[in-house]
Amino acid sequence: MSSMLVLAIVVAIGLVAFLIGRQRAAAQDNGTVKPHSRAHYHGWWAFLLAVLPALLLLAVWTIGSSFYLDRHIHAALPERTADSKVASEALDVSLVKSLAKGLHQLDANTLAALPATFAELQPLLAAKGVALATDTQDYMIPIAVEANAVQSRLGMIGAVLAFALSIAGAFYALRQIAPRARARNNVERLMLWGLLAASTIAILTTVGIVLSMLFQTIQFFESVSPMSFFFGTVWDPRFAAAGSGGSQGQFGLIPLLAGTLYIALIALLVAVPVGLMSAVYMAEYASPRVRSVVKPALELLAGIPTIVYGIFAVVTLGPFLRDLSAALTGGSPFIQGQSIFTAGLVMGVMLIPVVSSLSDDIITAVPRAMRDGSLGLGATRSETIKRVILPAALPGIVGAILLTASRAIGETMIVVLAAGVAANLTINPFEAMTTITVKIVNQLTGDLEFNSPQTLVAFALGLTLFALTLVMNIVALYIVRKYREQYE
Amino acid sequence: MNIMTEQSLENAVGDKMNAKSNEVIKMRGDKVGVFYGDKQALFDVNLDVRLNQVTALIGPSGCGKSTFLRCLNRMNDTIDSARVTGKITLDEEDIYDKNIDVVELRARVGMVFQKPNPFPKSIYENVAYGPRIHGLAKRKADMDQIVEQSLKKAAIWNEVKDRLQEPGTGLSGGQQQRLCIARAIAVSPEVILMDEPCSALDPIATARVEELIDELRQNYTIVIVTHSMQQAARVSQRTAMFHLGYLVEEGATDKMFTNPDDKRTQDYITGRFG
């Protein structure tokens, strides 16, 4: 029995329980006792009791039976000897499992007269579109057949148990129905747990990401010392092709970190003044008509995929700036086609809506009483903005800028296209430089061994970046929260 | 005891005499109307504000008294849809004239709002704000002087003199409101408009502010919007009753509260509607 069918039947049982429960609860309301919960709460409680325990059992059963099956196959396999044809035990088991899976495709007649050798079996399977590894051995065939039998037996037992549990749950809930039974509280408590579980997923995912990077990073630091990683000024990982070994390469973080911060700085120098001023205009001066057009238009900028900005930078802006600088010096261009400046400029434009939209919200949140108070004293609009509104909104704006900065630091596509992949260490903004994110992509693409430092360095870089943005976000949140307290 | 009573009686009579003889018109509203978009909120209001007197504007919610008050220093300009018709003068000068600078006007006609709204700055900076933007003090010592004088006039100096650098938002509601009054005084206005200045305060803080209003009358002309009949009776010399956007009746406070001409005023004062 397929697990989808089992699931569907369990849910069907639940729905029936829901209908009966609601019906019964409604019937009990004869007006003498005020019912504690409305009828549909009783229905839902019956549904939940019928479905949830059964699902839980199914999940546990499925995991358990797959373990059991593995052990079963393991035990059935012949003792390993030095001349075993299959490389490892794990491979042995997995070959049997894929064979067993393939056998599912065959019809009953073929299965009844199953050939004893793999050579004969293979064309039959191939005819059904099942391709198997050629080192599948003859002795695996009976084991696979046996495994299939065990699996279907286990599946059947699991399904029957699930149905039984489901029906038992439904009956239990239905028996509980009484005018003063607290079905509503039960349902809502379960809802609460559901919501809690949903919010835990995000946190657990973050923890999972950090841990997965952490292990690879530790592995990386076994071959490269943290000192030379964090304080090295040369990035030259050398493509150590599989097997060549020896050449270690240098993994200096400094050029990448400098590039990241440099480009982010230029982006912020563009985005913050422009974004802030547009926010002030939008919040303080724009008439509702203008605002209703300009604000969505500005926020549209935020919806453009960053790769499109990257294309714009590399195809239009980069060559334009190069030619412009060539024309200015009358010969060789001092701005390269790919440069920090170009990347920062385009990234800054990309971040304008982020700054302006966040700051606009913050400026609008400054109470009207502040404006009135200042205007009532004979201050002009711009004096009011400069001396009352911006200072009041400043902590929030700083928070917004930090959030923007962490976006700038995490940005990849614009940098790849506009600033290149060369890990230089320079202070000339018109030269190419690259960032941490770009190098992560660089190190993980291509044909590399997955356990060489060349690849593992990506995880160390990722963790560094994560720590960097995490600290910025924490600082930003702290500032924003502090600001919120001011008017309460 | 007797002498005291006699003396205070004499003072009161003196006050009344003063009020009678001192009939200089500081501000005058002539057929003032206000529109918010298409909706008219105020109709043909003719109302005089007399020098060194407290004029109270009373009436049920939505009757237009705050709207009229906000016309007097053109705070309605900050509302996009608002439009004012008619004529309002300050010392015989039309304040809606093109040649009038609204910033200058608001320095002459200050405003205290319903809810205390100190800026999120220190107490000192709150008071120094107005003088600073108008360039009233050349040196730090001058500014210190202005701040101290204003806080003293607003009867809050003793409570805050040791913590001038602490944030103004940390004061109690009543102190905040007196700080806002000090802030308004600091730019030496001629007229102070108060929009229900005590509605967010407890009775003790209210009493302090009312006392203060009475003292301020010596140097300033005050217009106050209030929901409290007792407050109007306690602090004002003139009272104007608004209803549904019209000025119903205006006159000396004593007369308004004892023998009003209009039945609506009578009903409102005795609490029959409103």
Image (cartoon, coloured by chain):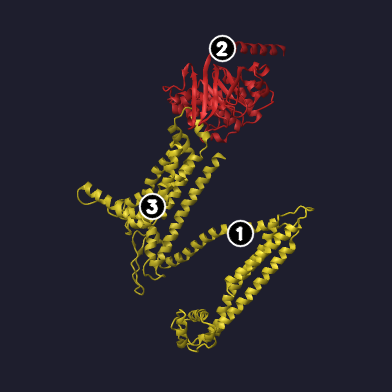
Chain colours: A yellow, B red
In front: label 1 or label 3: 1
Of residue A22 and residue B258, the one placed in the foreground of this image is: A22
Q: CA distance from mark 1 to mark 3?
A: 41 Å
Question: Please, what is the three-letter code of the amino acid marked with disc 2?
Answer: Asn
In front: label 1 or label 2: 1
Above or below: residue A193 compared with residue A146: above
Which residue position holds label 3? A261
Write the residue at 45% across / 86% down: A85
Q: Are the numbered discs 1 and 2 placed on the same chain, yes or no?
A: no
In the picture, measured across the screen, residue A476 lies left or right of residue A348, that is right
Other-residue count near label 2 (Cα within 10 Å), few / some / many at <14 / 14–19 / ≥20: few
Of residue A61 and residue A169, the one placed in the foreground of this image is: A169
In the picture, measured across the screen, residue B37 lies left or right of residue A326, that is right
The quarter of the displayed image where residue A315 is located = bottom left
Q: Position of residue A408 (x, y in %)?
A: 41, 52
Which residue position holds label 2? B22
Question: Tag 2, which secondary structure?
Answer: loop
The residue furthest right is A32
Other-residue count near label 1 (Cα within 10 Å), few / some / many at <14 / 14–19 / ≥20: few
Residue A314's disc number:
none
Question: Please, what is the three-letter code of the amino acid marked with disc 3?
Answer: Leu
Residue A194's disc number:
1
